[in-house]
Image (cartoon, coloured by chain):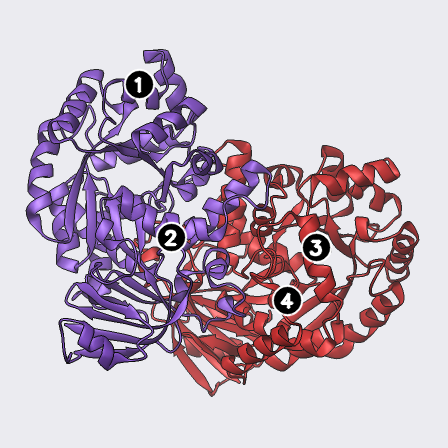
Chain colours: A purple, B red
Amino acid sequence: MNIRLYNARILTMEESRDIFEGEIWIQDEKILYVGSGQNPHEICDDLPYKCIIWDREVDCGGNLLMPGFKNAHTHSGMTLLRSYADDLPLDDWLNHKIFPIEAKMTPEDIYHLSRLAILEYLTSGITAVFDMYLTPETIADAFDHMGMRCVQTGAVNNFSQSPEMVEEMYLKLNKKSPLQSYIIGFHAEYTCSKELLEKIAALAHKYKAPVFTHLAETEKEVKECVERYGMTPTAFLDSLGIFDYGGGGYHCVHMTQEDISVMKRRGLTAVTNPGSNVKLASGIAPISDYLKAGVNVAIGTDGPASNNCLDMFREMFLVTGLAKIREKDASAVDAMEVLKMATVNGARAMGLDNADVLAEGKLADIIMIDLKQPNMQPAHNIPKNLVYSGSKQNVAMTMIAGKILYEKGIFYTGDKPEDIYRKAEDIKRCHNL
Amino acid sequence: MNIRLYNARILTMEESRDIFEGEIWIQDEKILYVGSGQNPHEICDDLPYKCIIWDREVDCGGNLLMPGFKNAHTHSGMTLLRSYADDLPLDDWLNHKIFPIEAKMTPEDIYHLSRLAILEYLTSGITAVFDMYLTPETIADAFDHMGMRCVQTGAVNNFSQSPEMVEEMYLKLNKKSPLQSYIIGFHAEYTCSKELLEKIAALAHKYKAPVFTHLAETEKEVKECVERYGMTPTAFLDSLGIFDYGGGGYHCVHMTQEDISVMKRRGLTAVTNPGSNVKLASGIAPISDYLKAGVNVAIGTDGPASNNCLDMFREMFLVTGLAKIREKDASAVDAMEVLKMATVNGARAMGLDNADVLAEGKLADIIMIDLKQPNMQPAHNIPKNLVYSGSKQNVAMTMIAGKILYEKGIFYTGDKPEDIYRKAEDIKRCHNL
């Protein structure tokens, strides 16, 4: 498919390139051209294609094209548990509400529940997610069937999955399809024995590969790790060699300055999850400290049972709003920094270097933001409008790998949303929820 | 106009009435009937109308009808300054960025800028606002012309407006139209001389009327008031008799236990503005303490220059999320409590007792929430879904005084949004912004 998106404002998210008026040409899954489009024939001469026959030309009506958001931490299949057990501390919530139900969920359940999450991602302009959940193969199927990009990571703990399974998935899912990939990972220090963690470290070394995990989400987790091993989770995991080839942590709320130095030294990403962290009263992550130290920060929604939505606009506002409160400084973490976290930095964490910015040769993971809504007026500063007043309501189009999957409120994934909703309700009933 | 909204789920927000399936009948500006609608002819016999001819019948498709949100603190005309000067401390921002431009804004400017805010309110299901800004008469015109309910309050300070003007507006705007009303108010303790405040207290006594003001928004404000008068702002204002007939404060972030006792004793409302409070690094209000003390809590967006959006869904999540963080307790301030704040409690603060819940005889200020969006699935708990995962994208209809002003993304206020946007851009250019 050749698609021309014209009459647009474009925010490529490349360093030092301001928003400009122009157009983007897409061929199959990639971007062929990004520019002013003022001399298309000359441009044509410069390109391998003398004359392009467009399958579709979209008049963007002056709206904004930008890279899709990268949701750098989620558990898609947890849609089943949205609003099922709220207003509880993380520990209670996880051990007494979530784990017992998860133990009963089938791979097929998780296939259908992930599809529900995918619909929601599309409404929020999310073009790729970094997913950690129970059944990687049916999750990959769900994302593949709906045309969405997904980077999975292992969820090994003492009760489910195993290093052997992580290795199998690492080899299998990285070859499955261009939309799917897999990064080594485990659930968390507090749910894994030392032996298990040593096996994960061995895997990282075998493949010279990065590793991701839940990290320093709560004070309790850090305190108990220090009691167990005499070290913080970051220091302890690093001492096992787990981060020798990079990777990062989800949440990273309760970190010491030494932990942050480890993050920097190992090139780790701190994936912040502010919606989940406030809802579960886990705390406020030290985002300004990460930025000062030069640590890569990305943004995730966390799963829909702890957040409870999959909305990058809410997360973006929270990242900067909570940083301002934590630092008692209204100038902390400015809007452009947040947009980078939600796009480029997320792509970097997820190994999606070809889906980070809008440029020739990059993957066509593009969203259109409706600037003709009252919350985007007047246009003093579009990035600030996006971060401080943007909303899912502004997502006019979500394109992944050159395919438009959501446009003006309609899904083009080949599914009827009602069927996906009905399936989720069926699963809920099956589990007596 | 007789409108029948049928095939709906209904959340009336009356105490101890659960969500039920049914319909709502509207005659002119009021609700005629709320119920299951199962025996319409019998119902007809019970009503003064034997047979109603519907001007419109709306199949709600199983979606939710509930009272519109009451945005209990805003400065609508500040749309001009959205994303104009962010990432600054409140004091700098107000004195060096906002006040100098406001000094140049004309009544006509504010008319047009308020209209831009009204469009945004409608997209967020807000059916009434509590507005404080510079030119009450053109503000009332803007709301009246677009059919929106607005309760204004005085913005007296040492530099603009006056107690005489507040009295004039009190008498005039409370008679202007059924959609407009006015409550005595002033900008803040720190912008008003003691003499000015004594005149406001005299007005409150003359009309036995409540008074509203910005209150204890920042630590600095409280500290300086204590230095000036040896009392916190709440205690000081109360000592002048300003709250003898009720009223309340906007923000109420930095309050002592004694301040909270004053709030309770005087029947004051604490209007919380969490989006603004995080963005300006003002702090987190003690919402749990208010609830424990039995103080009425309502929710406001604050103006679009400090927030920067006019979105009650974001505010609702922030109210509970920030309370959970402040209290280090994930069970703090549950979802239903937040919904009450955003509807019934706001109405109470704003003197809109006839627009608080959905019941026969009440004003038809009703919104429809699209439950067929992925963020509302599955339906374990609709109130929790609204507060924890709701978004402007879920607002399918906004009705004020029996008139549908916004439906499925289209505005029915008699204006083209583009004309209102253009006007805002014109004003921006006129002021060299």
Give the spatial CA distance, label 4 vs label 3: 16 Å
In the image, B142 versus B28, the foreground residue is B142
**Which amino acid does the dot numbered 3 rest on?**
Leu
Whether label 2 touches label 3, CB < 8 Å = no
Residue corresponding to mark 2: A312
Left or right: B134, with A27 as reference point: right
Residue A236 image label: 1
Residue B76 image label: 4
Give the spatial CA distance, label 1 vs label 3: 47 Å
Residue A342 vertical placement versus A235 (above, below): below
Element at label 4: helix
Residue B338 image label: none
Quarter assignment of residue B138: bottom right
In the image, B41 versus B173, the foreground residue is B173
Give the spatial CA distance, label 2 vs label 4: 26 Å
Give the spatial CA distance, label 2 vs label 1: 31 Å
Whichever of labels 2 and 1 marks the residue nearer the N terminus, that label is 1
Give the spatial CA distance, label 2 vs label 3: 29 Å
The mark lying in front, picked from 2 and 3, is 3
**Which amino acid does the dot numbered 2 rest on?**
Met
Quadrant location of the C terminus of chain A in the rendered image? top left
Q: Are marks 4 and 1 on the same chain?
A: no
Element at label 1: helix
Quarter assignment of residue B56: bottom left
Whether label 2 touches label 1, CB < 8 Å = no
**Which amino acid does the dot numbered 1 rest on?**
Phe
Q: Are marks 1 and 3 on the same chain?
A: no
Quadrant location of the N terminus of chain A in the rendered image? bottom left
Left or right: A44, with A97 as reference point: left
Residue corresponding to mark 3: B94
